Amino acid sequence: EHILSTIYLQDQDYYNARLHGETALELAEKAAEHPIRRDVYLTFSKIYQGSGDYQRALEYYQRHLALRDSLLINSRLKEQDLLRLQED
């Protein structure tokens, strides 16, 4: 669904991009697929920016950044844990 949303976004079909994005977001939330949620938030930001809703675009961009940073921190913490285990 996210791929379809991106394709519609490239065609500047913001209505269908948003519809498929909403479905992608629901599926990602149910499956706890945080990287997909991160990407969908960025896509929503671009959709709303393209359609002139800059406030919503900013909100989704902030969600994207927050989730991106959270995922990076978690990834780095896991790497540190693995390094500690290898040292022991």
Image (cartoon, rainbow, N blue to C red):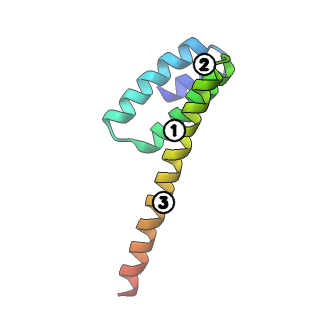
Residue 4 appears left or right of 52: left
Q: How far is disc 1 from disc 2 in space, using C-alphas?
A: 21 Å
Q: Position of residue 40 (x, y in %)?
A: 51, 33
Residue drawn at 68 percent across, 20 percent down = 50
Closer to us: 87 or 52: 52
Residue 7 appears left or right of 69: right
Residue that carries the numbered disc 3 in the rendered image: 73
Q: Looking at the picture, which amino acid does disc 2 mark?
A: Tyr
- Which label sits in the foreground, 2 or 3? 3
Instruction: Specify which label sits upstream in the sequence, 1 or 3.
Output: 1
Residue that carries the numbered disc 2 in the rendered image: 8
Q: Looking at the picture, which amino acid does disc 3 mark?
A: Ile
Q: Position of residue 74 (x, y in %)?
A: 43, 59
Residue 73 in sight: yes
For the residues labelled 1 and 2, say whether their Cβ atoms are less than 8 Å apart: no
Residue drawn at 57 percent across, 25 percent down = 56
Q: Position of residue 82 (x, y in %)?
A: 40, 74
| Secondary element at tag 1 | helix
Q: How far is disc 1 from disc 3 in space, using C-alphas?
A: 15 Å
| Secondary element at tag 2 | helix
Residue that carries the numbered disc 1 in the rendered image: 63
Q: What is the crowding at mark 1: few (fewer than 14 residues within 10 Å), some, or many (at least 20)?
A: some
- Within the image, what quadrant is residue 24 found in? top left
Q: How far is disc 2 from disc 3 in space, using C-alphas?
A: 32 Å
Q: Given the current orientation, which residue lies at the most extreme left position? A: 30
Instruction: Specify which label sits upstream in the sequence, 2 or 3.
Output: 2
